[in-house]
Amino acid sequence: MSPQTPQVEVDPVRVVPSEMGRSLERADGVEKVTGRARYAIEQAPSDALHAWLVTSTVARGRVTAVDHSQALAHPGVVAVLDHTTAPRLEESDNAELVILQDAEVGYRGQIVALVLAETSEAAREGAALVGVTYAERPHEAELREDNAVHRPESVNPDLPTDTEEGDVDAALAAAEVVVEETYRTAYESNNPLEPHAVVARWEPDAEGPVLTLHDSTQGVHGVATALAPLLGLEPEQVRVTASYVGGGFGSKGEPHSHEVAAALAARAVPGRWVRLAVTRQQMFAMTGYRTATISKIRLGAHADGVLTAIEHHALEQTSRIREYAEQTATPTRMMYAAPHRRTTHRLARLDVTVPSWMRAPGEMPGMFAHEVAMDDLAIAAGVDPVELRLRNEPETDPETGLPWNDRRLVECLERGAEGFGWSERPSEAGARLDGEWWVGTGVASATYPMMRQPGNQARITALPDGCYAVSIGAVDIGTGARTVLAQIAADALGCPVTTIDLEIADTTLPSATVAGGSSGTSSWGTAIVAAAQQFRADHGPSPDPGVSTTASAAEHRAAQTHAMHSFGAVFAEARVHRLTGEVRVPRLHGVYSVGRVINPRTARSQLLGGLVMGLSAALLEESWRDPRFGHFVTQDLATYHVATHADVQDLRADWLEEDDQLATPMGSRGIGEIGIVGTSAAVLNAVRHAVGIPLRQIPVTPDQLVGALPGS
């Protein structure tokens, strides 16, 4: 943010909004359904060169030779880049991005060469003709309890690695009821509908940007900031746009090696456009994934189920070339009241591709473990699972001692239980057989922190006829940000949404943080409100066309005085076939406390998507890594299974009416990720209630159930 950009104290007092709360259709809906929306790869002109990546076939070692001859002899091939011929990069501590600079191989799937050709077919065939030989070294690629011993300095985003309060061991020794179990989640791969892709051009003599990228990314300014120093440029010399993005789930939240590859390729052929699309198979190796987790949990409680001690020891993996530590145990620190608490994180440093963000990183696997453990406690104490959670409701944040901004988990549980018909649930597991199907129900709580990122700016410009241009470098990854931000701007300026001309997703616009962490609308919307209020102060209610104001919101002081979180409750019904172990989930309901809902249509879409993704994780999703070779053998959507329409039947998402002015001037909080949190646990708890078998890992598949089902 430049020193000239004012920071505005946003006035929390406002009239009832005329545009927020309306269920508007997506502003870009017609473009998308008619095929007129142009995604990153479609920005390439017809004469663009095509880049194809050559990736390593060993998990660790050195490239000893690269033979270009056959590839260069192939018709249409223009150039082959490897570590001996690629343009040089500046030094960086991000080894994931420093590609084609030396012979070292840190993981299977690492970029070791790329081919540039006049057609996609020639590029692909040329890449297959590049001969690469290696000197292999021993590698380790398996997460185990005995090798997850590395203590990171912090966990994502910048949280304490370990926390402890009270005497956990003594409290557990004195507890009347103790649960001590291990819970596991699988590797998961993001798999957005649009694969990662980028179109690049290098203009060394340009007066404006030297490098232009049309990128499929969740944050254009983040890409420019990361790539510019690597390339010896200033951030303003790198222009990044992301007009339309076909999903990301976090995998497009930070740059990956393919974006550097496109920049290097463009630099090698200055003045020509280069297009690079990562294949679905390559995405499993280079664009991020959710680490598998092992959660060792101990709960101590009185006979009535009231917690006295909580311990959560999270084991996961990172890459040896670059550390990423998922914050798996952090929701355990604040979810339920207990005077004695301990959480830790330890990593196995493996010779594998770098894990990264995937929808609700940390909260999704961490709350799965904690919520299944709570059902273990409910069974051990003989307490109804909903009642158990109500009995452990904290008055203030157990981690910080701060008052809550607006914790309404109890209402979510009670409203959800009533709507779901929880009172009709048999107290005993395995008590209901409907024909060939065992039937059970489960519940789990959900939470996600409310985050408002600093550094966002917005610009308001008066247009003729009472219209306004609203500009911010935010990216809409399919969530409906275009629609919602226009509603926020219209409300702040006191005008109809039809008078708002919204510009987004370009680094030439005021800076914006990443579309991630459920912080997009909160961060960008607050900046827009700040700019609108400053604009009115500068130019009055009837501004002259052409006048403009750029501003950002002041520091979010309430985040220092209150614990900022959203909450929810998920209820699931599971049916398990008594002979085959097949699992179906005919009902999946969520009730949430997420602040003011700005657009019910797009909000419901986000929450339903989260519920489906949680169901998918519970029953289907798993990337299988072969430790002998260090790579995922599941490399397509035929072997990596995700939920489809046939898996989704009675799906509902509701929310409480509220207006959280402590969170944002819009009264809203983030909704993008809370829908997936707790959902897998609710499904697993329902399966356990159906068949009476202790289950503590996902995905739960028929092979885990067959032979252990009642009557088998």
Image (cartoon, helix red, strand yellow):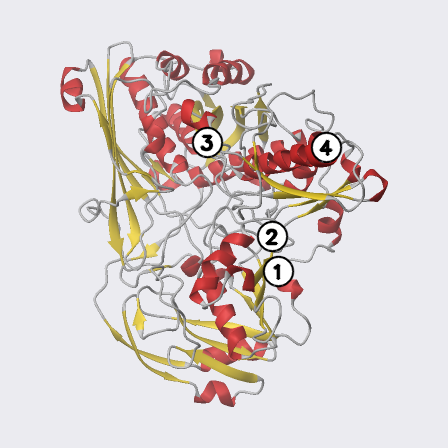
Label 3, residues with CA under 10 Å away: few <14, some 14-19, many ≥20: many
Measure the C-alpha gap from mark 1 to mark 3.
32 Å
Kind of element beneath mark 3: helix
Q: Which mark is residue 366?
A: none
| Mark before the other along the chain sequence, 4 or 3 | 4
Tag 2–tag 3 contact (CB < 8 Å): no
The residue identified by callout 3 is: 679
* Tag 2 and tag 1, C-beta contact below 8 Å: yes
**Which sits in the foreground, 579 or 94?**
94
Quadrant of the image occupied by residue 539: top right
Residue 338 in the image: state x and y as whole percent: 28, 18
Which residue is drawn at the image coordinates 43% and 81% (left, top)?
Answer: 130
* Quarter of the figure with the C terminus: top left
Residue 630, position in %: x, y?
A: 31, 61
Residue at 48% over, 12% down: 424
Which of discs 4 and 2 lies nearer the camera? The answer is: 4
Residue 245 numbered mark, or none: 2
Question: Could you tell which of marks 1 and 3 lies nearer the N-terminus?
Answer: 1
Q: Secondary structure at mark 1?
A: helix
Circle 1 packing at 10 Å, graded few (<14), some (14-19), many (20+), is: many
Distance between mark 2 and mark 1 Cα atoms: 7 Å
Q: Quadrant of residue 106?
A: bottom left
Q: Is residue 708 visible?
A: yes
Q: Amino acid at mark 2?
A: Val
Q: Amino acid at mark 4?
A: Leu
Q: Is residue 711 visible?
A: no
Q: Residue at x 53, y 78 (%)?
A: 116
For disc 4, the marked residue is 493
* In this rendering, the label closer to the viewer, 4 or 3: 4
